[in-house]
Amino acid sequence: MHIAILITNTDFSEFAAARPDDGEKFATLLGTARPDWRFSPSWVCKDDFPEDVSAFDGLVITGSPASVTEDAPWMLRLKKLVLAAIDRRQKVYGACFGHQLIARALGARIVRNPGGWGHGLLPLHRVTPMPWAIGPEQMRFYGSHIEQVAEAPKGTDIVYEGDGLPVAGLMMCDHLFTVQHHPEMSHAFICDLVEEYADVVGPKVTARARESLQEPADRSFIGEEIARFFEWGR
């Protein structure tokens, strides 16, 4: 398969530059599960869009520190691209910002997390069966977010719930799949991110995140599930 990775990450700091970008992270995650797949990254946040997204077997929309509520021009263009892909039932997977942008494009509200930052290792509970799922009912993801989707858009089903996070993942038939958290992050990266964000999120959130990271995320299950999503029904 040939997957387009649409990079929305607007962090161009020294911290980000010293580590693999989101295109590399997702290619590693999915390439580990499917070594023969090809991945083509496009920096859509820099207005670099693929010439023909319909030519790909599937799309991945990454996370970002930006807020989808900003409605920057590149975000509006990406929303139109997503809606067109959904209309033609092209496989679309969204993580964090990608999850929120897809939900917003479909009419959902994006709100501040009532409980504050979700940060570190965050468990999600599967609430709707997915035919491509192979992992346990409770999956542990790395995550970092201060906004969330308020309700499931029309035509979608909620697939994951978390603590204070009623819409932690969505699906639409077998061509749309999203999650609020970051399946692509490695343990080393999230540990570094927690320290980098310590002044942003505050000492209590940082201490809780550090404590959570004594255990790893379920990356092997997560990567396989995403790969099976792209394969399902083909």
Image (tube, helix red, strand yellow):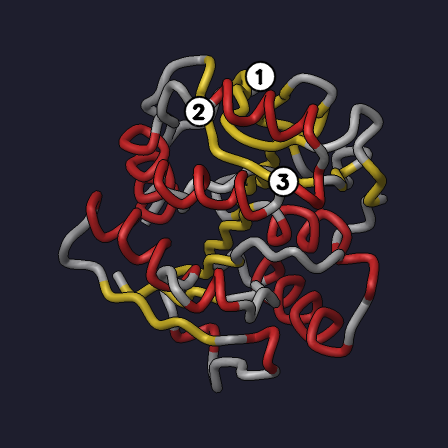
Q: Quadrant of the N terminus?
A: bottom left
First in sequence: mark 1 vs mark 2: 1
Q: How much space separates mark 3 and mark 1, taking CA atoms? A: 32 Å
Towards the viewer: 228 or 124: 124
Q: Which SS class for mark 3?
A: helix
Q: Compared to 179, does 94 lie above or below?
A: below
Say which residue label 3 marks. Answer: 198
In the rendered structure, the answer to whether residue 232 lies left or right of residue 193 reads: left
Residue 66, above or below 139: below
Disc 3 or 1, which lies upstream in sequence?
1
The kind of residue tagged 1 is Val
Quadrant in the rendering for residue 189: top left
Amino acid bearing label 2: Leu
Residue 35 x/y as whole percent: 15, 53
Q: Establish if 75 lies above or below 217.
A: below
Number of the front mark, 3 or 1 = 3
Relative image position of residue 59 (x, y in whole percent): 46, 61
Q: Residue at x 45, y 40 (%)?
A: 190
Q: Quadrant of residue 44?
A: bottom right
Q: Residues within 10 Å of mark 1 (few under 14, many from 20)?
A: some
Residue pictured at 77% horizontal, 52% vertical: 104
Q: Residue furthest left?
A: 36
Q: Secondary structure at mark 1?
A: loop
Residue carrying label 1: 127
Give the residue at x 64% y 52%.
Answer: 97
Give the mark nearest the N terminus, 3 or 2: 3
Residue that carries the numbered disc 2 in the rendered image? 213
In the picture, the disc for residue 100 is none
In percent of the image, x 46 and y 14: which residue is there? Answer: 138
Q: CA distance from mark 1 to mark 2?
A: 24 Å
Give amino acid for label 3: Ala
